[in-house]
Structure formats: structure tokens, C-alpha cells
Amino acid sequence: MFELSFLQIESMVATFLLPLFRVASFLMVIPIIGSQLLPVNIRLGLAIVLTILLLPGLPEIPSFNALAVETWIVVAQQILIGIVMGFMVQVLFQVVVLGGQMIAQQMGLGFASMTDPANGISVVMLGQFYLTLVMVLFITMNGHLVMIDILARSFHLIPIGSGGLPDASLWKIVRSGTWLFSAALLMALPAVTSLLVVNFAFGIMTRAAPQLNIFAIGFPFTMLMGMLIVWANLGGFLGQYRRLSEFMLNYITSLLM
């Protein structure tokens, strides 16, 4: 008769639950899957299925006493690792949102906002447009599969029970905010510079012809020029996305080393 002792059952449950904490926390934070577009129960189901698929290839998981403080520390470490990895992908997506907001403010569309269905917050329409493009490119170029591959490799780079993230990785997470603003500025710089030249030209026209109503002409013209500039920049959007995603994927990998 097949019998299992309590210690064997406890070991089997720990072998499944400890990786599940890292996988579930990652899926709860990552864009698209971790957004409000998917219900929590579906995300939890995906986490369970993904953990079952990853278990055969994971390193050996040490046994822990379920009631020991050390076990809860390991659980917190797994949750933190998963959240950090998902958060860094969120940073990649927020780069284009911030860049779109910079362009929209310069072209006079800063007031045109809508509710983001994924996050439930108000976002400038141009930023939402760029965010939708990034989501489509992320899925089309198998970005979700690349992130699952990085998640699987994270169990080999930081095995369960070997400790949490290195101290240097914590500073890298803080410095990612600098990269967020600098990358968004570089993305919006061509459009912002072009619109600045347009506004400068209107300033010269106002000095030359004070009777010209610059507010009646300048606002719609600036908005029209901004839309044309955004349309012209779409040709290089794919290259920008590739550079940003490549940098961020390498950055996530460096956090785990």
C-alpha cells in the first residue's frame, strides 16, 4: 500500500509552493498578464500551470520546516524576486507612456486623457496609444515567452534557499528610475524639438505682426504639426522598442547575478 509520512507530504508541498510564490508574484506584477484585463483567478491558474511545467527543470529545493522563521524569510525572498522582475518590465512599458506625455504636453494635447483599462488610471491619449503599440509588439515578438525563459533561469541564478537579491541589485533597481526618465526624454526629444521650433517661429510671427491672433492660429497648427511629427516618428518606433527591450532584458538578467 502506498503510504506517505507527514514529513514527506510537507516536503512535497514545499517543493511546489516555494517556486509558486516567485512565479505568482511575477505574474501579478508583469504588464498585460498582471493588469486588470485578466481576473485574479486566471492569473493564479496560470501561475500554478507554469509552476508545474517549470518544476522538472528546477534545481533541487532544500527542505524547510513549515513553522520555522527561516521558511517565512525564504517565502518573502521569493515574492520579492518575482515582484522585482515584473516591476522592471513595467518600467519598460512606462517609458513610452512618459514619452507620450512629454510629446502631448508640447503639442497641446496634455488635457486629452482617457482611463487606461489595464491599470485603471487616467493616461494621456498619446501615451495610451504608445502603450497599446508596445503591448502589441511585446506579444507579437514573443516578449512573454522571453520573460518566462528569464523567470526559469532565475531559479538557477538565485536558487531557492540561497538568499535573496544581491545588495548591488537593490541599487540597480533604484537607478532604473533614472533610466526611465532619460529613455523617455530621448524618445520624445525629436518631436519636442520640432514642436519647439514651430513655437519659436510663431513667436517671431507675433513680433513681426502683433495684430495676428496667435492663439487662434497657433494652437490648432501646433496640434496638427504634432500629429504629423508623431506619424513621421512611427517609422522608427520599432527600432526604439527593440533597443529599449534589449536593454531592459539585459538589465533584468544583471539583477539576478
Image (cartoon, grey):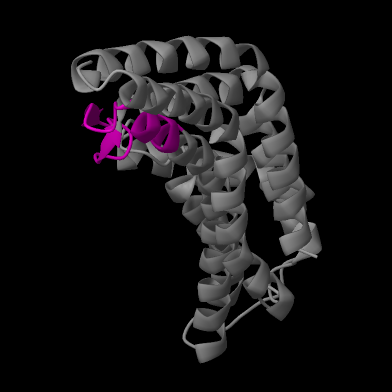
Vertical relation: 23 (above or below) 139? below
Decide which of 169, 211 is in the foreground and name it: 211
Q: Is residue 59 visible?
A: no
Q: Quadrant of residue 166?
A: bottom right
Q: Which residues are magenta?
A: 100-123
Q: At 39% across and 36% down in the image, what residue appears?
A: 101
Q: Position of residue 179 (x, y in %)?
A: 62, 54
Vertical relation: 65 (above or below) 232? below
Task: Name the quarter where the N terminus is drawn.
Answer: bottom right
Task: Name the quarter where the C terminus is drawn.
Answer: bottom right
Decide which of 117, 50 is in the foreground and name it: 117
Q: At 29% across and 26% down in the image, what residue appears?
A: 109
> Does residue 118 belong to the magenta stretch?
yes
Report the residue that reaches farthest toward the bottom: 69
Q: Position of residue 112 (x, y in %)?
A: 23, 26
Q: Is residue 11 visible?
A: yes
Q: How many marks?
A: 0
> Does residue 52 belong to the magenta stretch?
no
Decide which of 186, 65 is in the foreground and name it: 186
Residue 54 located left or right of residue 47: right
Residue 48 located left or right of residue 41: right
Q: Quadrant of residue 32?
A: top left
Q: At 57% across and 10% down in the image, what residue appears?
A: 232
Q: Position of residue 12 (x, y in %)?
A: 60, 63
Decide which of 2, 205 is in the foreground and name it: 205
